């Protein structure tokens, strides 16, 4: 294996069994889009485009040679996880068509629980914290769960987080823009905390990388620090969105306070 792979090398197709559910989701979405177009049901083309981009990013992240280089580069591994957590989920959530789901239906109740801000925050924080403390990360790399399980958990829990922030199902998500802004700030804290530890730690924290031959001639410590930068930069757009939502909420409060009493 070359220690200096190019982008073309990293993007060589290496499909595995996880490609099947991706194809099924894409096929189901395409069928729904075509059916909606034939019946005149509102389904904007830009939503379909964003959903397709999300699926393409998901395939490039999970079905290429880069997915098999976990032990050769912690930075590459973290880059893949950040695509799964901060790029794919918002594209998929924004790509959802307008859905009329009754809050009291079975599906509505399940989604109401999963998209509850405290539930989403607890699951997201558990994944971030457990798999980034040395014991959890070392175990995941040694047991090879880092290859498939951890990326899947990052994707699923981040879908819940972005579902709360972007609120694609208002019928089962009564949260206003202010509470979503505060949620976004809280959800960003675990990633920023982990990234700060990686940036300023004086030694390599994870056993599998202490004496590893890292890609692109990086030392293990440089590899870890680069991972911290990747995680921190990847979290900035979500953090910026949270501040925008809070700012809009404050403007709305100011306008309401200036209105005469009814």
Image: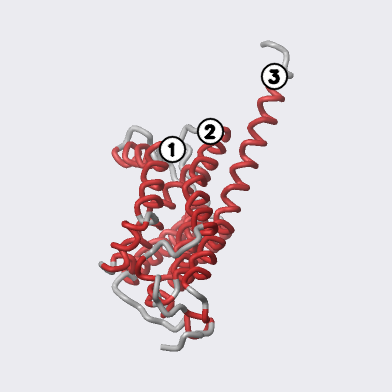
In the picture, the disc for residue 198 is none
Q: Earlier in the sequence, mark 3 or mark 2?
A: 2
Give above or below for 228 relative to 112: below
Distance between the alpha carbons at the discs numbered 3 and 1: 27 Å
Asked if one can make out residue 91 in the rendered structure from this viewpoint, the answer is no
Residue that lies at the very extreme toward the front in this rendered image: 202
Q: Earlier in the sequence, mark 3 or mark 1?
A: 1
Give above or below for 228 relative to 56: above
Q: Nearer the viewer, mark 3 or mark 1?
A: 1
The residue to which callout 3 is attached is: 257
Q: Residues within 10 Å of mark 2 (few under 14, many from 20)?
A: some
Image quarter in which the N terminus is found: bottom left
Q: Is residue 202 left or right of residue 121?
A: right
Depth check: give the residue in front, 207 or 216.
207
Residues at marks 1 and 2 touching, judged by CB atoms closer than 8 Å? yes
- Identify which residue is drawn at 41% across, 82% down: 13
In the picture, the disc for residue 179 is 2
Distance between the alpha carbons at the discs numbered 1 and 2: 9 Å
Q: Is residue 251 left or right of residue 65?
A: right
Distance between the alpha carbons at the discs numbered 3 and 2: 18 Å
Depth check: give the residue in front, 91 or 103.
91
Residue 121: x %, y % from top left: 42, 42
Q: Residues within 10 Å of mark 3 (few under 14, many from 20)?
A: few
SS for callout 1: helix
SS for callout 3: helix
The residue to which callout 1 is attached is: 117
Q: Quadrant of residue 153?
A: bottom left
């Amino acid at each position: 294996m070359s220690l200096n792979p190019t982008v073309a090398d990293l993007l060589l197709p290496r499909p595995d069994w996880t490609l099947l559910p991706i194809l099924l989701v894409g096929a189901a979405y395409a069928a729904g889009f075509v059916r909606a177009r034939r019946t005149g049901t509102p389904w904007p083309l830009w939503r379909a485009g964003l959903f397709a981009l999300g699926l393409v990013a998901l395939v490039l992240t999970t079905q290429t040679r880069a997915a098999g280089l976990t032990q050769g580069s912690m930075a590459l591994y973290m880059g893949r996880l950040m695509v799964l957590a901060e790029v794919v989920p918002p594209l998929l959530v924004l790509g959802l068509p307008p859905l009329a789901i009754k809050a009291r239906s079975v599906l509505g109740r399940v989604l109401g629980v999963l998209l509850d801000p405290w539930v989403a925050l607890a699951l997201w924080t558990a994944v971030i914290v457990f798999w980034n403390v040395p014991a959890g990360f070392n175990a995941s790399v040694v047991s090879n769960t880092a290859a498939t399980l951890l990326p899947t958990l990052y994707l699923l829990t981040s879908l819940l987080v972005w579902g709360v922030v972007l609120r694609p199902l208002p019928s089962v998500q009564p949260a206003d823009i202010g509470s979503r802004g505060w949620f976004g700030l809280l959800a960003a804290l675990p990633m920023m905390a982990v990234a700060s530890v990686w940036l300023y730690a004086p030694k390599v924290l994870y056993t599998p990388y202490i004496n590893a031959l890292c890609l692109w001639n990086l030392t293990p410590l440089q590899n870890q620090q680069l991972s911290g930068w990747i995680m921190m930069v990847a979290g900035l757009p979500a953090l910026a969105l949270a501040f925008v939502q809070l700012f809009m909420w404050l403007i709305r409060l100011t306008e309401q306070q200036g209105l005469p009493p009814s």
